[in-house]
């Protein structure tokens, strides 16, 4: 990922820039914050005045004045606190939504290599937890931090006015609290980090089990997955117990320490009252202030750590936002595209294994209106050729030219409208059949939909369904058969009326009749460039040229008859597949 300035102030300023649309509610929230803080600081003082008015020389006017001021201050403080909280919650919600929208937009623009090298658990955690946490750092944490800071200064000022010796004793509480907090945070933050990592691990284990549920059920591995998930939960539980034990010990120490400080202040205050150096009302006011000051000092220390943690989440989010995809696209979108494709000395290796060449000096040509077939053993490089032609990756050397121009010069949306792909494993979304077929299209007509359905041979089964094209297909198309999903994927490609059509094992899940119908349909596309990848070699016998990919290189090329006469790799593959088909037929 891209390097991001790690300085807290730099991250905070960047957060401020993202909060610019919320400047009005934020200013309003801070105004109400000041009003609420002033009201809270005056309450103990009015309480002391009220108690002093109840002495043996009862002053009804002073008592009534104190009661009125207390009520007015309490109402104003409560109203301001409510408005402050509401405005801050509004800014948190709006900022979180904005951050998630921006972050998701950055994610969907990344190249495939990014997702192959990034944990899905990290991505979902960043979208959910980190985005929410970084939004809190500005609205909630800064709000509470400023409130506690102003309250601490104001309360100390009032305490010094009431009795400076007692204020001096109270001041000793702060360094002890801060020291204890630092020691506590040293252990607590490490355990919090461990809990987070274990939760991400648990989510990843659960996500993989659910995603591969067919494989889990097929192999009877339910208990294996259960044990793995239980182990990850047990690890999380262990870290949580440690975290909570450390926190409980710290809170117990702070309670005893604060109780001891209060007893000391009460004893010393009693001595001051006896010597007539302060009144009982002043002592009550001082104790109320002292009860508040400890909480505010502790909040300042805790929020400093919480703010650093929130800014760390913000740094992670900004790293993802700043990550630039390795695949760049231009703005080329010609009115006419012939579909002439050339692979020129393509060499490629995946980022996970940069030293292992998947393709090396691969060159071949695909002419408009022709059918090119890629064959070879599994792992030979066929799928990588398709991925490069789909512009999912960039080759380390060489170029793929489309009508004489590199793929990276074409507009992204235009390119993927003109180059349609049907993969071996259809990628369907949890929506209707119609939405899946028209996925990604800005506009289409009913005639286009019906024509694509007819060409892909899906109308017969679609109209047998109660809701027809509005039928919900389930998550990843789970409510449909493999063959039905395959034909919907074919219809999705055909409705785009592409100039280049890539069929990657497209007929692997179809019956013989459907396969023949689709082959007849494809034969009607006379001007399009077609690339077929197939293990069933019978489906590519009529291709204009067959490219044999072996160990990342082009080992043979020619028509079916030419390659059979050479009796090379293609001939051996053909014979092996023929024997396997015969064995299956006999079985």
Image (cartoon, rainbow, N blue to C red):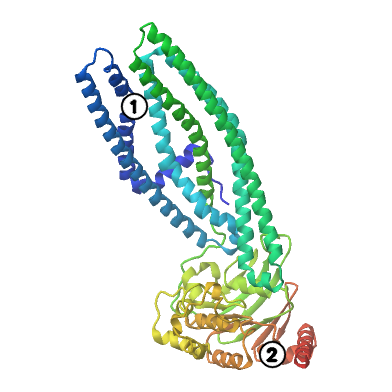
Number of marks in picture: 2
Most extreme residue toward the front, as rendered? Answer: 56
Residue drawn at (33%, 17%) of the image: 281
Residue 118 at least partly seen: no
> Can you give x and y, in whole percent of width and height, for residue 94 in the image?
38, 51
Image position, residue 126 (x, y; %): 53, 53
Assign the C terminus to one quadrant of the image.
bottom right
Residue 375 vs residue 405, the one in the foreground? 375
Give the crowd class for mark 1: few <14, some 14-19, many >=20 residues within 10 Å.
Answer: many
**Earlier residue among tags 2 and 1:** 1
Which residue is disc 2 drawn over? Answer: 538
Q: Are marks 2 and 1 in contact (CB under 8 Å)?
A: no
Image position of 274 (left or right of 258):
left
Q: Is residue 274 above or below residue 414?
A: above
Q: Foreground residue, 381 or 112?
A: 112
Mark 2 or 1, closer to the camera: 1
Q: Position of residue 518 (x, y in %)?
A: 57, 90
Point 36% across, 46% down: residue: 20
Residue at the disc numbered 1? 41
**Which quadrant of the structure image shows residue 359?**
bottom right
Q: Quadrant of residue 504?
A: bottom right
Horizontal side of 587 relative to 143 (left or right) equals right
Task: Identify the element where label 1 is drawn.
Answer: helix
- Residue 451 vertical position relative to residue 403 in the rendered view, above or below: below
Could you give the CA–CA distance between mark 2 and mark 1, rounded to whole angstroms? 87 Å
């Amino acid at each position: 990922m891209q390097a991001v300035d790690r300085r807290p102030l730099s991250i905070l300023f960047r957060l401020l820039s993202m909060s610019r649309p919320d400047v009005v509610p934020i200013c309003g929230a801070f105004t109400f914050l000041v009003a609420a803080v002033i009201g809270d600081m005056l309450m103990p003082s009015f309480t002391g005045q009220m108690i002093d008015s109840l002495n043996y020389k009862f002053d009804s006017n002073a008592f009534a004045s104190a009661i009125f001021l207390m009520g007015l201050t309490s109402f104003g403080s409560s109203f301001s606190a409510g408005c402050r909280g509401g405005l801050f919650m509004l800014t948190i919600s709006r900022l979180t939504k904005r951050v998630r929208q921006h972050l998701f937009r950055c994610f969907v623009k990344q190249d495939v290599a990014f997702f192959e090298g990034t944990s899905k658990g990290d991505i979902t955690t960043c979208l959910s937890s980190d985005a929410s946490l970084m939004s809190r750092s500005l609205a909630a944490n800064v709000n509470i931090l400023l409130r506690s800071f102003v309250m601490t200064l104001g309360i100390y000022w009032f305490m010094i006015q009431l009795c400076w010796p007692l204020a001096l004793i109270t001041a000793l509480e702060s360094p002890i609290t801060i020291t204890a907090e630092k020691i506590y945070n040293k252990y607590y933050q490490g355990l919090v980090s461990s809990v987070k990592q274990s939760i991400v691990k648990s989510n990843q284990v659960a996500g993989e089990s659910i995603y591969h549920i067919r494989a889990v059920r097929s192999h009877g591995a339910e208990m294996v997955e259960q044990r793995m998930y239980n182990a990850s939960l047990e690890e999380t539980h262990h870290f949580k117990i440690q975290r909570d034990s450390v926190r409980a010990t710290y809170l117990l120490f702070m309670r005893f320490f604060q109780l001891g400080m209060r007893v000391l202040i009460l004893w010393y205050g009693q001595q001051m009252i006896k010597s007539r150096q302060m009144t009982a009302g002043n002592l009550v006011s001082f104790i109320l202030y002292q009860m508040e000051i400890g909480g505010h000092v502790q909040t300042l220390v805790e929020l400093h750590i919480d703010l650093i943690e929130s800014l760390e989440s913000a740094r992670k989010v900004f790293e993802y936002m700043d990550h630039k995809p390795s695949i760049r696209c231009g703005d080329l979108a010609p009115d006419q595209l012939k579909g002439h494709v050339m692979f020129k000395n393509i060499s490629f290796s995946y980022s996970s294994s940069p030293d292992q060449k998947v393709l090396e000096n691969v060159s071949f040509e695909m002419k408009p209106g022709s059918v090119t077939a890629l064959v070879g053993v599994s792992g030979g490089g066929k799928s990588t050729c398709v991925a490069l032609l789909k512009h999912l990756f960039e080759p380390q050397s060489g170029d793929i030219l489309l009508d004489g121009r590199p793929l990276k010069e074409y507009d992204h949306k235009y390119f993927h409208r003109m180059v349609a792909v049907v993969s071996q494993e259809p990628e369907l979304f949890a929506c209707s059949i119609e939405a899946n077929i028209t996925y990604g299209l800005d506009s289409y007509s009913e005639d286009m939909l019906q024509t694509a359905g007819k060409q892909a041979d899906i109308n017969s089964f679609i109209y047998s369904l109660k809701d027809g094209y509005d039928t919900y297909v389930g998550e990843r198309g789970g409510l449909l058969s493999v063959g039905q999903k395959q034909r919907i994927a074919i219809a999705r490609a055909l409705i785009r009326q592409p100039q280049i059509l890539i069929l990657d094992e497209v007929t692997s899940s179809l019956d013989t009749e459907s396969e023949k119908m689709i082959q007849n349909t494809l034969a009607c596309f006379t001007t399009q460039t077609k690339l077929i990848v197939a293990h069933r070699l019978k489906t590519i016998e009529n291709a204009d040229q067959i490219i044999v990919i072996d160990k990342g290189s082009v080992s043979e090329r020619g028509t079916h008859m030419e390659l059979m006469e050479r009796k090379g790799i293609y001939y051996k593959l053909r014979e092996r597949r023929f024997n396997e088909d015969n064995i299956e037929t006999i079985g």
